[in-house]
């Protein structure tokens, strides 16, 4: 259940996103768009309300691994649902394919956090040139890994980012998040031994040191050894581990979000769920409040019973995601829309 490897996706009830629906606040239209970031072509979808404008805009940034513009998995499309809900509420929404997916070139697995942040900055620059977008009201909503990237983007371009929303974005370092996830996985497999749990922590700590030093070969060996600590049914094939140890994973595992979070002075919303087993709310909620304490326009909120995907959950474990009918708890969507309206 590694932070970089678990598919951070959610179930969707609707099959598509009507471009002219009239069942909610506003109608909107969808257009396919293309932009450039140096040698990378970025393809995505922009949804724009039909009446009024220029509109505030939200750039959606997905979780770890290679995601398409909808964060799609097994008929589940959380970014489609977010785009639909926010565009009905009067916001233009841009969602794009990750590097190496769909209409976007490059390879996300070989990309650093600076590379990925630069892609988001290119998307913001694209929106700022459009006459139907208000350039002073463009924000970034990041989920999971995207929730770590959003403050970094704002720190790199403070004059171009009006607000950030961090949905299950970590306040802990990537290494500490990995330690938590390893413990959850070991405990779910029946491990209660303090020594075995401590050994898992030590393996992750070593992994992070190796990745920080850029020693991917040794990191792969260490990860294979840690994999052997798991029950046989839970172990990943060595070739899967080797493939997973890449530049994106190294950036995610070694990233410390504290400096970028402490630098935020724009409206900031951080959302957690009590059933999230990937980014632990008990630890990350108070830590996030500490890092945002000097930002008078920051809000931190934890939803009771919500998992990493902001679904209403029973166990919160990843194997439950696809069994939950609702893509995102309606209470989360309502809270998000109310916060955006109050902070624009």
Image: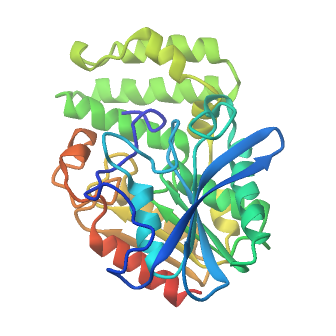
**Residue located at (43% from left, 10% from top):** 238
Residue 48 against residue 228 in the figure, above or below: below
Judge whether residue 242 can be spotted in this image: yes
Judge whether residue 300 can be spotted in this image: no
Task: Locate residue 86, reporting x and y percent.
Answer: 46, 73
**Residue located at (32% from left, 61% from top):** 273
Task: Locate residue 236, reporting x and y percent.
Answer: 36, 17
Figure quadrant of residue 73? top left
**Residue located at (62% from left, 41% from top):** 103
Residue 6 against residue 230 in the figure, above or below: below
Q: Left or right of 338: which side holds 188?
A: left
Figure quadrant of residue 139? bottom right
Residue 73 against residue 334 in the figure, above or below: above
**Residue located at (75% from left, 62% from top):** 126
Colour treatment of the image: rainbow
Figure quadrant of residue 187? top left
């Amino acid at each position: 259940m590694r932070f970089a490897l678990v598919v951070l996706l959610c179930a969707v009830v609707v099959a598509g996103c009507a471009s002219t629906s009239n069942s909610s606040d506003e109608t909107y239209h969808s257009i396919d768009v293309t932009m450039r970031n140096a040698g990378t072509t970025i393809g995505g979808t922009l949804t724009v309300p039909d009446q009024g404008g220029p509109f505030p805009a939200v750039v959606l940034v997905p979780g770890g691994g290679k995601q398409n513009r909808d964060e799609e998995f097994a008929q589940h499309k959380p970014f489609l649902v977010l785009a639909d809900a926010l565009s009905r509420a009067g916001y233009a929404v841009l969602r794009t394919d990750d590097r190496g997916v769909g209409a976007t070139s490059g390879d996300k697995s070989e990309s650093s956090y600076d590379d990925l942040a630069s892609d988001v900055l290119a998307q913001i620059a694209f929106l700022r040139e459009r006459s139907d977008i208000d350039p002073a009201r463009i924000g970034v909503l990041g989920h999971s890994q995207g929730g770590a990237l959003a403050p970094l983007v704002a720190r790199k371009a403070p004059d171009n980012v009006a607000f950030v929303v961090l949905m299950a974005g970590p306040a802990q370092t990537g290494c500490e998040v990995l330690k938590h996830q390893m413990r959850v996985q070991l405990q779910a497999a029946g491990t209660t031994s303090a020594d075995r749990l401590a050994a898992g922590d030590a393996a992750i700590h070593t992994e992070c040191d190796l990745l920080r030093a850029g020693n991917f070969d040794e990191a792969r060996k260490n990860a294979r050894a840690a994999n052997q600590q798991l029950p046989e049914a839970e172990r990943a094939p060595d070739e899967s581990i080797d493939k997973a140890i890449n530049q994106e994973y190294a950036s995610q595992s070694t990233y410390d979000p504290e400096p970028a979070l402490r630098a935020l002075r724009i409206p900031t919303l951080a959302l957690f769920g009590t059933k999230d087993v990937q980014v632990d709310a008990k630890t990350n909620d108070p830590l996030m409040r500490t890092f945002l304490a000097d930002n008078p326009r920051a809000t931190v909120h934890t939803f009771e019973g919500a998992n990493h995907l902001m679904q209403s959950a029973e166990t919160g474990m990843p194997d439950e995601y696809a069994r939950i009918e609702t893509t995102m708890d309606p209470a989360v969507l309502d809270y998000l829309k109310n916060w955006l309206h109050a902070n624009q």
